[in-house]
Image (cartoon, rainbow, N blue to C red):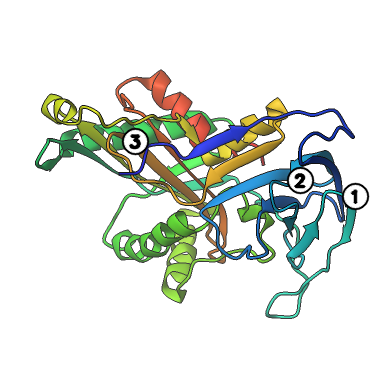
Amino acid sequence: MKRFIFVFFLGIFYLAGCTTANKHFLKVDTTPSDAIVSVHETSDVSFVQIRQIAGTTPFEKTFDFGKTGQLWLEIERRGYAPYVEKVLPETGKISINLEKIKDKNGKYISDYALPEINRILLARPDIKIIQRGFSNEKFSEEKSTIAQEELIKGICNYVSGKYEVITVQSSDIDKPLLRSLWRDVRSAMEMLDPIRLKYFAQPPFLETKSSRKAARKLGDIYKTEVILLITGKQNLETAGMVVGKIGITAAGTASSYAGGYSRALSRGDSFFVYNIYTPNFAEGTNLNAALINCSNGEILWINKGLWGRIPFEEPDTVKNIITDLLDGISQN
């Protein structure tokens, strides 16, 4: 069983120019700036389970080159071709001129930005509360409905004064549109990296034409620019299940990907390390959120996280979770 841990922070500080063991100072700069830099131990950067972010350019800090004495830096920025640079302990400084790229229509890709938002369309959160015994699981419709309603209230309160929130009514017209939309959004929530999404060279879109059409039609019906979708599951273990698991440990982070990254930046941590995919968990709560541009189906923002048991009947607790989950939307 995988442990209920998905984000770790490494905040290691060194004096500029100081070298001990195989740790060496490196200055990284790009043109244009504000490119995100991932650190890899091999040249194969296409697929990793655990990703280490050094920060956004320009920066200077000390890197651990380990036993091999070499690292590869993956550099990404919206609208520019990804770049991979091999660095050695003696490198000291790198300056990269990033190459501007075009979309399939031959137009240069714009920098990342949320569209102008006045109204957010909120799909009713798809959250399930599961009561787990030692040999069975039971879906609680009552607890799930309470969680859904409290999340809706909490979200409306959180964005109050900045955006107007319209909740999808799930009419006969809405239901088939939502089914198509949810299909692609669930896949995006699972596969896309919340930290790097806004730095991807090209903006990600909903996969199928039908889901993009559904987003556009829902936006037209409700007169909204974006749609927010939230899904999740909470496992509640019975006393019998807990007793039966003696010796099996689990620890919650009480954090989302984006929230954890923001806190790491504000603390001045040197590196941010996280699992790409959300691990399995025995008890606790997993929430995923995505913001979709209604006009074209662009996936504007994604966040996800793992928390312990959330008492949804406590408004202050729900408020704290939503503040963490929606980190990134409120900052744009």
Near mark 1 (Cα within 10 A), the count class, few <14, some 14-19 or many ≥20, is few
Q: Residue 42 lies in what quarter of the image? A: bottom right
Q: Kindly identify the amino acid type of the residue bearing the numbered disc 1.
A: Lys
Q: Mark 1 or mark 2: which is in front?
A: 1
Classify residue 328 as left or right of residue 35.
Answer: left
Q: Is residue 162 visible?
A: no
Q: Are marks 1 and 3 in contact (CB under 8 Å)?
A: no
Q: Is residue 250 left or right of residue 256?
A: left
State which quarter of the image contains the N terminus.
top left
Q: Is residue 288 left or right of residue 74?
A: left
> Which residue position is annotated with label 3?
285
Q: Which residue is mark 2?
A: 56
What secondary structure is marked by label 1? strand
Identity of the amino acid at label 2? Thr
The residue that label 1 is drawn on is: 93
Q: Find residue 30 and report its horizontal and vertical position in percent.
A: 86, 54
Identify the mark nearer the N-term, 1 or 2. 2
Which of marks 3 and 1 precedes in the sequence?
1
Q: Going 66% across and 66% down the picture, which residue do you hit?
A: 202
Q: Residue at the spot x=69%, y=31% of the render?
A: 269
Tell me how far mark 2 sits from mark 3, CA to CA: 31 Å
- The alpha-carbon separation of the residues under discs 1 and 2 comes to 15 Å
Rendered-image quadrant of the C terminus = top right
Q: Quadrant of residue 308?
A: top left
Q: Residue at x 81, y 47 (%)?
A: 57
Q: What is the secondary structure assignment of the residue under circle 3?
A: strand
Packing grade of label 2 (10 A; few <14, some 14-19, many >=20) is: some
Q: Give residue 32's position: percent from left, percent from top.
A: 86, 56
Q: Residue furthest bottom?
A: 105
Residue 118 higher or lower than 315, as above or below: below
How many numbered discs, if any? 3
